[in-house]
Amino acid sequence: MKFSEGEQVLAKMPSSDDYQKARIVNVKGNKYKVLFRGGEEYTVNETDLKAQRTSRSQTRSRGRPSGKSPSRSSPSRRSPARKSPARSPNSQSRKLPVRNARQAKISIARLEIPKDNSSDTDRTEGSESLKDEFVEPPIQSRLRELGPITRRSIRIMSGVAKAEHDHKLMMLTRNIDRAASLPVERKAQYNALSDGKERGLSVQPEEDIMKSIHYEDFDLETFSEGKTKEIDFLSKPQEWGGWIGALLLIIAIPVCTILLQIACSNNHCSSKKFHVSLYKEWKLFLNLEAFLSYAGFLCFVAIISVLPIGRLIDGQQSIIGRLQYRINGIWILILSLIIFGGFVYKGYNISDFLIKNSLSLSVAGLTYGILLAVALYVKGGRMPVSNLNIYGSTNNIIYDFWQGREINPRLGPLDFKLILLRCALIGTILINLAAIVKINQSIAPELNNLNYIAIEVALLQIVHAADNLVFESSAVTSFEITYEGTGFMLITRYLTYPFLATLTTRYLLTNKINKSIYLIGLFTVFFCVGYAIYRVSNSMKDKFRKNPFEPSLSHLETIPTKRGKRLIVSRLWGHVRHPNYLGDIIMHWSISCLSFATDFLPYIFAIQLTLLLIHRAVRDNARCGLRYGYAWKQYCSRVKYMILNRVF
């Protein structure tokens, strides 16, 4: 290990040949996590690091304290004819100035700052740490100590002046209170941190930091009033209709989920045969075998997720730094399919178990989701302020429980959000496979009785879910992973997703439909078009977020923002702001329409997904407006529609 933690080095940024100054944050073997001056964190190899060179003036002054070598200053080398007898030592003739700037020593007095005992409630941690520091005298007093001024001394002192200005600017921006944009009740935790403890990245908007540099030009009262308004805005529920809307959704989601499973269970799937009176026994809802099976499935996915299988990638820069993700979702799917095939081969009736126990399995998912949401809410209350979700740190318990206090909660190597996402996708694939197996086991020897539409719907849903596992690396840059809080909303949606997404497949199991092959082909083409839009737009966005300077993306037209990021305004992203949402909606409506049903059950998930993505587009638009400011207004003037051109 050539370098140690905390050492200042020159590091090469990914996709770049230039070395920039950085500080080593963490060391793992030959891998170094470095923090660049701009705040970016990357993991680089040891070959991409080199030590910082000391300045030329320092090496010269250490190795050569004198301007002449000892041999040249020897008395024996001096010629007696060098002095002219005609010139006396006391002559008042004009002398040329001696260029001894290299030998001049600058003695700078250090003045201690007088102690100020006045109380100031707005003083930050950084300003208090400056009490024991020293201030250098102005550059004019140091110039007078240099004696004769030469061109070299002027050049040296001009460099000193620039360095002095940069140092003051750095000290000023470093000592700004970065908790100003957090809720009021969290500032006590922020101020309780020790002076020597390093805090994570701030959630304070960059424009406030730049304003603070020129604080002398602003009216402090006006500035503090604006700050108070921002704090009040963030400390109140802003989305989902506030805490009342969140409370209604917390009650409605479990009730609607259970009612839909009642309508599609017990060998029937129709809203016309919906009878709640048939489900009075609690054993139909609380099946011990279903609870244990679901718990075993969750533990299986969690254990395989932490194994060193698959590549390790860096996620997006967040408020707590740059997180790393182990991309092995496709391997978990392969292992799950092997286990599923083994059960079928050995004669275990796993297909009937998954189809018939959808009600008790969904109740198990809701139960585990509520327990996990409560546990993560308690865990979030003990986390540092920098780890909290800024939209889930309000004054309301109900709203924070709904939104989630943390964005990416982790317990050691366990990433809860990624594990839940994998469970949702793999569970959907397994239930669709169970439906295909059940269809093949129940048909007569003639192929004419085969339920082709049900098989096609199941295969299309498998393609959609498997795509998200194959391209799992692009999911880490999505809105859900990067910005959405992990609360009741997200957890229960993931754990009940397999049973809601497969309503169309289970409907076709009990309601066989025969339609023209041309109609089936038409909706299949619609699905392919939606999939192409979804995959191309997501891949382009993921590649651009990871490296916007990649040569293959040089043709894209972009708008720069004040945060250093750029917004794409060409190709698919130049027509609508969320083309990936449009592709996802087209795919799910194509799957639902393949049922050709007059019942609403096959369409319920497509309706739910459409409303969810429309609301998410509105939320994302409001958040980006606060994050990017004028650049987002300029972007909206170029790309006017969110999902569907000339409609929404």
Image (cartoon, grey):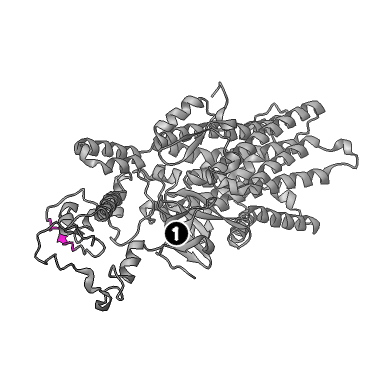
Q: Quadrant of residue 81?
A: bottom left
Which element carries disc 1, helix, strand or loop?
Answer: strand
* Nearer to the camera, 160 or 603: 160
Q: Is residue 113 magenta?
A: yes
* Residue 169 higher or lower than 648, as above or below: below
What amino acid is at disc 1?
Answer: Leu
- Number of labels in the image equals 1
Label 1 neighbourhood size at 10 Å, few (<14), some (14-19), many (20+)?
many
Q: Quadrant of residue 199?
A: bottom left
- Residue 430 seen by the camera: yes
Question: Residue at left 55%, top 55%?
Answer: 325
Residue identified by numbered label 1: 10
> Where in the figure is residue 281, as x and y percent of width and height?
61, 47
> Where in the figure is residue 240, as x and y percent of width and height?
44, 35
> Where in the figure is residue 505, as x and y percent of width and height?
71, 38
Q: Is residue 214 magenta?
A: no
From this viewpoint, which residue is outermost toward the right?
A: 446
Q: What span is in magenta? A: 107-116
